[in-house]
Amino acid sequence: MGLTKPWLRFRAATSVSLSVASTRLARPWLLLRAAAGWRADLAAAGLGALSAAALPPLHVIPVLLLTVPGLLCLIDESRGPWTAARRGFWFGLGHHVFGLYWITEAILLESARYWWLVPFAVPALSALLAVFIGAPCALARLALSGWRRALMLASAWTLFDFARQYVGTGFPWNPWGSVWAIPGSLGDVMIQPAAWVGTPGLTLATLLLAASPVLGRRGLAGAAVVLAGWAGLGWVRLQGPEPPGSGLVAVLVQGNVVQGQKWDRATALATFERHLDLTRQAVAGLGGASSVVIWPETASVFLLQSDAAARQAIARAAAPARGAIVGSLTFTAGQPSADPRNLPRNSLVAMAADGAIAGVYDKWHLVPFGEYAPSWVPLSIQVVPGQFAFGRGPATLHMPSLPPFGAMICYEAIFPAQVVDQLDRPDWLVNITNDAWFGNSTGPRQHLAAARMRAVEEGLPLMRAANTGISVGFDSQGRELGRLPMGVADTLALPLPGRRPPTSFSRWGLVLPGLLASAGAGIALGLTRRRKGKPTRF
């Protein structure tokens, strides 16, 4: 009995604490129940905007404990699915306007031509993406209030995130699973489950945890247990033995070339020489260690496909490195021509130590309105002049004396389960990018978080060379090995870690998170139908 009393006191104290916490958290939502019409829409937009604080680089994740329950409260008070969809749309609009404001930076670089797009571009894109939040809210309204509605919202949200990856041009930017990609050891722990369920699976779990306060004490207690288990699994995975390294040093070159000067003929040679000088200095400091040099996206202002002199210049600067991986434009016919079928390609050129081309990878996820104009858009609007040709898809490049690697160019890093050729699995990943378009905004940092998630999902180390930053290396578990900050011209030499065995996500891709989300939606809707006509328990 003496041992039982302290436990009973602890349980009573915990029960009271959770009760007080849930009551305090519930107060803001009660105010939302009185909102209707445009006031409810405005409240939804405000909640969506506040949710953007959870995204990289801020990672203020606790705000979701207010905004998701607030959204569920607005759905509860909706007259029907269409009203819930409208409120979800406004939530999504506010969320994406604040999360994607940095797109305006790219338009301002071509302000002389597209100044009129500045007030419309981000709201228009945000409105399109808001549909993928409005639809899950409509489906959530079909489920009973409480945990069933929360489960339906989280499950449908995840499924519509899949649609975001494929519908139209595909734009799965800022999935909520990426909020856990916090720099440092805490983020290392929390992103590990992506090896099993990917970023989409983390999105599903994040929404369920964020909805827990509406379920009262039991919901908060359950969320605490799940979060502890999540962190425990991540910690245990990080304690596993390190795979043997490759013995290779990756030299990341960050030229820091201002976007407006990148293709200026007057500065083109100086830009090329800057990359050569940085390469010479970095390789000279390695003391003859085996290395490979990596330049960013379109870092070469010369067409390496046909310019043997430029390739030899890079090879001499990189000597005695085993090879160089350089971003460059290529053409189907080898040289630019008046033939409209001879379109440029945004490519990665892999060169052997003697300057010979060992392989070429062409970008296949092109940026809409930046690298091509979607055929379904009535207006022909492109921030970057010219039309680019599409590559064939994920590929593994094999170079003499180097481990085979998978390539990602810029925008391609945001697509989970679409970055590796699973029939020819590489040993590491190379991501070359040019985020100079987006200035010193949240855009490059959100892009970096996406690339980090790909390393965990695939169980492969990733080396990222960015023109203006952030250049960084990750091991196969997403742990940062080193970085160059934005806005500096410098190099970073990092030992290339070994790869891990294929992860569950690398084998099955979106199947497992898709099944989990589908099962959740089915359970929520199935139990709703069974209890139709019965009073709802809260």
Image (cartoon, rainbow, N blue to C red):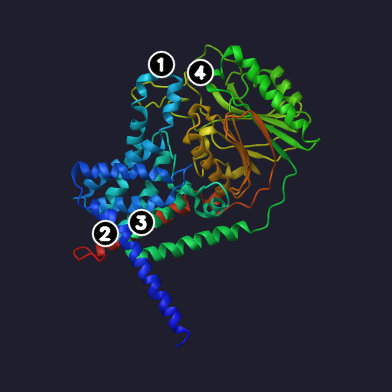
Q: Is residue 257 above or below residue 37?
A: above
Which image quarter: residue 363? top right
Residue 394 on image: x %, y %: 56, 37
Give the alpha-carbon distance from disc 4 to disc 3, as whole Å.
52 Å
In this rendering, position of residue 70 left or right of residue 176: left
Secondary structure state at the residue bearing disc 1: helix
Secondary structure state at the residue bearing disc 3: loop
Residue density around tag 3, few if under 14, some if 14–19, many if 20 or more, within 10 Å: many
The residue type indicated by label 1 comes to: Arg
The residue type indicated by label 3 comes to: Ala
Which image quarter: residue 305? top right
Q: Which mark is residue 245?
A: none
Residue density around tag 1, few if under 14, some if 14–19, many if 20 or more, within 10 Å: few
Which of pointers 1 and 2 lies earlier in the amino acid sequence? 1
Residue density around tag 4, few if under 14, some if 14–19, many if 20 or more, within 10 Å: few
Toward the right, the furthest residue is 288
Image quarter (top left, top right, bottom left or bottom right) of the C terminus: bottom left
In this rendering, position of residue 98 left or right of residue 323: left
Kindly tell me whether residue 383 is visible in this rendering: no
Q: Which residue in the structure is indicated by mark 1?
A: 113
Q: Which residue in the structure is indicated by mark 4?
A: 341
Give the alpha-carbon distance from disc 3 to disc 1, as whole Å.
45 Å
Q: Which residue in the structure is indicated by mark 2?
A: 145
Give the alpha-carbon distance from disc 4 to disc 2, as whole Å.
56 Å
Tags 4 and 1 in contact by the CB under 8 Å rule? no
Please give the name of the residue rendered at 54% of the width and 33% of the height, measured from the top-left corner.
410
Which of pointers 3 and 1 lies earlier in the amino acid sequence? 1
Q: Which residue in the structure is indicated by mark 3?
A: 211
Toward the bottom, the furthest residue is 1
The residue type indicated by label 4 comes to: Arg
Q: Is residue 276 above or below residue 159?
A: above
